[in-house]
Image (cartoon, grey):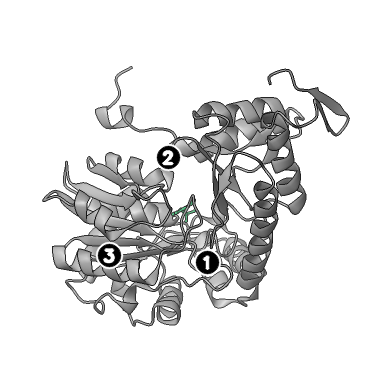
């Protein structure tokens, strides 16, 4: 079969892949514990459901403007005012089919072949592949001090005349790290000085724990103008547990918005009207559900950390946001894909290999599941790896005997 050079170079999304494999095993009746997922388990807000069903019930389900309905744009404008403290116009806003599409369309709008996009590692699996799909060059930058906090000097060092943009994601997937105010200030100033785009992927910005602080890029970036190169990405997927609704957005300068709107118009003709109404329902509805999700995730993070801290040989940095813990398992196995497959095969626990996030030897464990899933899942992993564990483990009625250590 003849396929394009770009397509040949694109890896399947590691998270979607593990989801599929786990789903197949679960369908066969296997007692899977899913610590690989990237979506909260709570229900979508009722205001979102009612808004979506009212469009369906009307029977008038039509195309919308490619960049979003006026009421969704108004809701996003208000959101931007509430959280970013800036006033933007409808011409600065584009709603897309998920934050993922908003990022993709932004990259398509700004990148020429061979231009480089820098992002701190570990990074969300899709950044590198999306840049490659635009014929660009991904430049992941791992902090040299081994922490999950990027350093401006590491990024400066990777800057070249081909650098077109930097992508920042805080709270971060996969580490849960929340980047410092100083770093956000430095990166804004760096991008402004170099005249390059800064893509702020803020999809987890309301899911921050303890006394950590998410930093608004507009505390430091110049106000939105025609020359502004800040691209703010957000969406309903994570904060409202609406991953399946597929609505995200970008807030950008007018000229870039126009280009993105044209590109998106040729891709999807715009997001589904049903889902846009649902997003309006969520954004304009009661907000207490977001806080309750945040508190639940913080508690789940605490339980997961307690379990991991009692696990000899591994290293886990306490996340300050989002719903992942990125754990160093290299003491047991350096090849993270091998380890993830081993854990799924032997103890039916789904995790995501660190190598797909740009750091080998790690696994990403999700805290989205129930407390029972978190405790039992970590227990099973420990049993599979720790030679001091007893030789047998019961999963329901099934007795597992460890014959690999
Ligand atoms: C960092 C990051 N950005 C963007 C997205 C995409 O979100 P959406 O579901 O809105 O496309 C995800 C989803 O996993 C993510 O983790």
Query: Which numbered marker is on residue 279?
Result: 1
Side of 342 relative to 185 (left or right): right
**Residue visible at 33% across and 48% down?**
144
Q: Between marks 3 and 1, how big is the CA–CA gap?
A: 31 Å
- Disc assigned to residue 187: 3
Q: Earlier in the sequence, mark 3 or mark 2?
A: 3
Seen from the viewer's position, the closer of residues 13 and 274 is 13
**In this view, which residue lies farthest toward the left?**
161
Distance between the alpha carbons at the discs numbered 3 and 2: 22 Å
Q: Earlier in the sequence, mark 1 or mark 2?
A: 1
Give the mark toward the camera: 1 or 2: 2
User: Residue 315: x and y, percent?
Assistant: 56, 45
Q: Secondary structure at mark 3?
A: helix
Q: Quadrant of the C terminus?
A: top right
Neighbours of disc 3 within 10 Å: few (<14), some (14-19), many (20+): many
Q: Is residue 276 left or right of residue 117?
A: right
Q: Please tell me which residue is depicted at 44% across the width and 60% down the height of the picture.
A: 248
- In the rendered image, residue 132, in percent from the top left (x then y), is placed at 28, 39
């Amino acid at each position: 079969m003849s396929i394009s050079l770009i397509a040949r170079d694109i890896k399947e999304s590691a998270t979607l892949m593990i989801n599929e494999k786990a789903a197949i095993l679960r369908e066969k009746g296997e007692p899977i514990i899913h610590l690989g997922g990237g979506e909260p388990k709570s229900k979508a807000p009722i205001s979102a459901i009612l808004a979506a069903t009212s469009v369906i019930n009307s029977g008038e389900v039509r195309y919308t403007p490619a960049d979003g309905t006026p009421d969704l744009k108004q809701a996003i404008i208000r959101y931007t005012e509430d959280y970013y403290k800036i006033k933007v116009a409808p011409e600065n806003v584009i709603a897309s089919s998920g934050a993922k599409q908003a990022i993709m369309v932004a990259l398509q709008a700004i990148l020429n072949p061979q231009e480089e996009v820098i992002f701190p590692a570990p990074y969300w699996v899709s950044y590198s592949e999306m840049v490659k799909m635009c014929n660009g060059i991904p430049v992941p930058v791992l902090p040299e001090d081994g922490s999950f906090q990027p350093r401006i000097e590491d990024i400066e060092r990777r800057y070249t005349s081909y650098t077109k943009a930097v992508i920042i994601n805080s709270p971060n997937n996969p580490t849960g790290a929340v980047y410092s105010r100083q770093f956000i200030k430095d990166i804004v100033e760096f991008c402004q000085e170099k005249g390059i785009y800064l893509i702020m992927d803020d999809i987890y910005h309301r899911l921050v724990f303890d006394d950590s602080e998410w930093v608004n890029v507009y505390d430091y970036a110049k106000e939105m103008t025609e020359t502004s190169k800040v691209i703010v990405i957000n969406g309903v997927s994570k904060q409202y547990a609406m991953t399946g609704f597929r609505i995200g957005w970008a807030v950008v300068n007018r000229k870039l918005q126009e280009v993105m709107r044209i590109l998106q118009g040729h891709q999807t003709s715009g997001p589904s009207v049903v889902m846009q109404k649902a997003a309006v329902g969520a954004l304009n509805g009661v907000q207490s559900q977001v806080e309750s999700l945040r508190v639940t995730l913080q508690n789940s993070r605490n339980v997961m950390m307690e379990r991991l801290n009692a696990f000899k040989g591994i290293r886990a940095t306490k996340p300050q946001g989002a719903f992942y813990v990125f754990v160093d398992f290299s003491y047991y196995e350096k090849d993270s894909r091998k380890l993830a497959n081993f854990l799924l095969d032997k103890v039916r626990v789904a995790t995501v290999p660190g190598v797909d996030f740009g750091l080998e030897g790690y696994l990403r464990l999700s805290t989205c599941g129930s407390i029972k899933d978190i405790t039992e899942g970590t227990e099973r992993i420990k049993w599979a790896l720790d030679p001091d564990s007893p030789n047998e483990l019961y999963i329901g009625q099934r007795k597992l005997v460890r014959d690999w250590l």
